[in-house]
C-alpha cells in the first residue's frame, strides 16, 4: 500500500499558475549512431508523388518547390506539402555533415508533420534531380519530374520527434532521416546553392530523446 | 515564374532572435460534432493490457493506477504508462460534460503520447470496473482486473492532437476519445470521487485544429 507520493499537487483553482514546458524537442540534432535503438514498429515508408512541379519560389531563406502527393508512414497517410534544401546539412551523423539536406515536408490529416530528410553529397550527376535543379535555379516550372526517384535506394532511416527548423519551430514533427546519402554533381550543387549557401539552423540539444533506427533493404 | 514571395526572411546569423511558437495545441477541448471530419486512415485501436495492477497511489491531484500492457493505434505500438480519472470530464461533446473521464495514458518508443479517453456516466454497476474502484478507494492492490473490459463496446472515437492536461502540459499527445460513454453505479462513482471530486482542467481554444472522427462498430 502506497501513501501520498511526492508528486507536486496542482491547484485546480489556480490553473493560470500552471507551468507549461516546451522547447525541449527541437531540431536539428546530431545523430550518435552508437546510441540509436531499433524501431519496434513495422515502420514502412511508401511514397506516391505527382510528376508535376506545381510551384517554385524563393521564400527568402530557401527555394521551395510544391508537388502533390502523399506518403504512407508507419500506417498513416501524410500529404506532401513542399520540399526545399538546406546547405550544409542541418542534421549530422556522428558529427559528420553533408553538403546539402533535402527536406520533403508532409502533414497528416490531424495536423502532425513528418519530414523525410535526404543527405546529399557531391559525386555523380543525379539525372532524376536535374529537372528540380533547373527549376530551383531559374525559378521556372519544369514539364515533369520524378521526385520518388531521388530517394536513396536503401531506405534505412533514423527517426526521432523534433520540430520545424525554421520559425515558428513548431514541435509536432516526426523526422525520418535516410542513412544513405544520394549523390549530385558539382554543377548541380552549384546551381542549388547559388542563392542560399548557408541556410542551416544550429543544432539543438537532444534532451534525452530516443533516436530510433529502422533497417530497410 | 514567381518572384521572391512575401515570406518572412529568417536571419541564419541571428538565430537567437527566432521566435518559437507553442501553446496553440492544448487540451482539453470541447468537441463540436458538426465540425468533425472523418479520419481517412484505417485508425484501428487494439489493446492488450495485463490483468495485474502493479501500483496504485495518490499523485496529489488524482489516484493513479499502473498496469503493464500496450495498444496498437493506427499501426503504431504504444506502451500503457498509467491510468487515472478526472471529475467531471475534461473533454465535452457539444458542450455536454460527463461525471467522470478515464484517461489511459500510453507512450510510443519515440516518446509521443497517446491517451485513450472514456466518458463515464452514472447508471448500471460496472463489474469490470469494480476491482479498480476498490483499489482506487482503499489504495490497496487488487488480485486481478480486466482493464480491457472497461472500454466501450462501440469503439467509435474522436481524434485530435493536443497536450497533457496537467503540468508540464506537454504538446505531443494524440487524443482518442470514445464517443460512447460507459456506465458505473452511484456507489462506484462515490468511491472514485471521494478524494478528488473536482480535478478537471479548464477547456482550451481549438485554434483551428482539425478534430477527426472514426466510426468503428
Image (spheres, coloured by chain):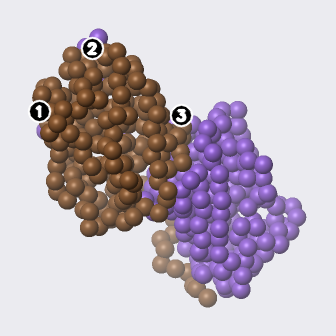
Chain colours: A purple, B brown
Q: CA distance from mark 1 to mark 2?
A: 21 Å
Count residues near mark 3 (Cα–Cα under 10 Å), then give few for <14, some for 14-19, many for 20+.
Answer: few
Say if mark 1 contacts mark 2, CB within 8 Å.
Answer: no
User: In the displayed structure, does residue A149 sit left or right of residue B40?
Assistant: right
Q: Residue furthest top?
A: A1
Count residues near mark 2 (Cα–Cα under 10 Å), then give few for <14, some for 14-19, many for 20+.
Answer: some
Label 1 or label 2, whichever comes before in sequence order: 2
Task: Give the residue displayed 73% in from the left and 73% down from the top.
Answer: A146
Residue at mark 1: chain: B
User: In the displayed structure, does residue B24 sit left or right of residue A206?
Assistant: left
Query: Which secondary structure, mark 3?
Result: loop
Q: CA distance from mark 3 to mark 2?
A: 34 Å
Q: Which mark is residue A208?
A: 3
- Residue sitting nearer the eye, B84 or A27: B84
Q: Does residue A41 sit above or below A142 in this rendering?
A: above
Q: Which callout, 3 or 2, points to the residue nearer the camera?
A: 2
Task: Give the residue displayed 47% in from the left and 63% down from the top.
Answer: B40
- Residue sitting nearer the eye, A20 or B76: B76
User: In the displayed structure, does residue B102 sit left or right of residue A187?
Assistant: left
- Residue sitting nearer the eye, A190 or A188: A188
Question: Circle 2 is placed at which residue position?
Answer: B140
Q: Quadrant of residue B146?
A: top left
- Residue sitting nearer the eye, A168 or B123: B123
Question: Circle 1 is placed at which residue position?
Answer: B186
Residue at mark 2: chain: B
Q: Which callout, 3 or 1, points to the residue nearer the camera?
A: 1
Q: Residue A130 in the image: x percent, y percent?
A: 78, 75
Is residue B216 at least partly visible in the picture? yes
Q: Residue A8 in the image: x percent, y percent?
A: 27, 26
Residue at mark 3: chain: A
Pointer 3 and pointer 1 on the same chain: no
Count residues near mark 1 (Cα–Cα under 10 Å), then give few for <14, some for 14-19, many for 20+.
Answer: some
Amino acid at each position: 500500500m502506497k501513501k501520498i507520493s511526492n508528486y507536486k499537487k496542482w491547484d485546480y483553482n489556480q490553473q493560470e499558475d500552471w507551468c507549461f514546458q516546451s522547447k525541449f524537442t527541437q531540431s536539428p540534432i546530431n545523430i550518435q549512431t552508437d546510441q540509436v535503438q531499433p524501431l519496434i514498429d513495422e515502420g514502412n515508408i511508401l511514397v506516391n508523388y505527382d510528376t508535376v512541379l506545381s510551384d517554385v519560389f524563393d521564400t527568402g531563406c530557401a527555394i521551395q518547390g510544391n508537388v502533390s502527393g502523399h506518403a504512407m508512414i508507419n500506417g498513416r497517410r501524410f500529404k506532401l506539402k513542399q520540399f526545399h534544401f538546406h546547405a550544409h546539412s542541418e542534421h549530422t551523423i556522428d558529427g559528420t555533415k553533408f553538403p546539402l539536406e533535402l527536406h520533403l515536408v508532409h502533414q497528416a490529416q490531424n495536423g502532425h508533420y513528418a519530414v523525410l530528410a535526404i543527405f546529399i553529397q557531391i559525386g555523380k550527376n543525379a539525372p532524376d534531380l536535374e529537372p528540380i535543379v533547373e527549376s530551383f535555379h531559374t525559378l521556372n516550372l519544369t514539364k515533369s519530374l520524378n521526385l520518388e526517384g531521388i530517394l536513396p535506394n536503401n531506405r534505412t532511416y533514423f527517426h526521432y520527434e523534433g520540430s520545424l527548423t525554421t520559425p515558428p519551430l513548431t514541435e509536432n514533427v516526426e523526422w525520418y532521416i535516410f542513412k544513405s546519402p544520394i549523390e549530385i554533381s558539382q554543377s548541380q550543387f552549384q546551381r542549388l546553392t547559388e542563392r542560399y549557401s548557408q541556410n542551416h539552423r544550429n543544432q539543438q540539444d537532444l534532451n534525452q530523446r530516443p533516436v530510433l533506427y529502422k533497417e530497410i533493404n
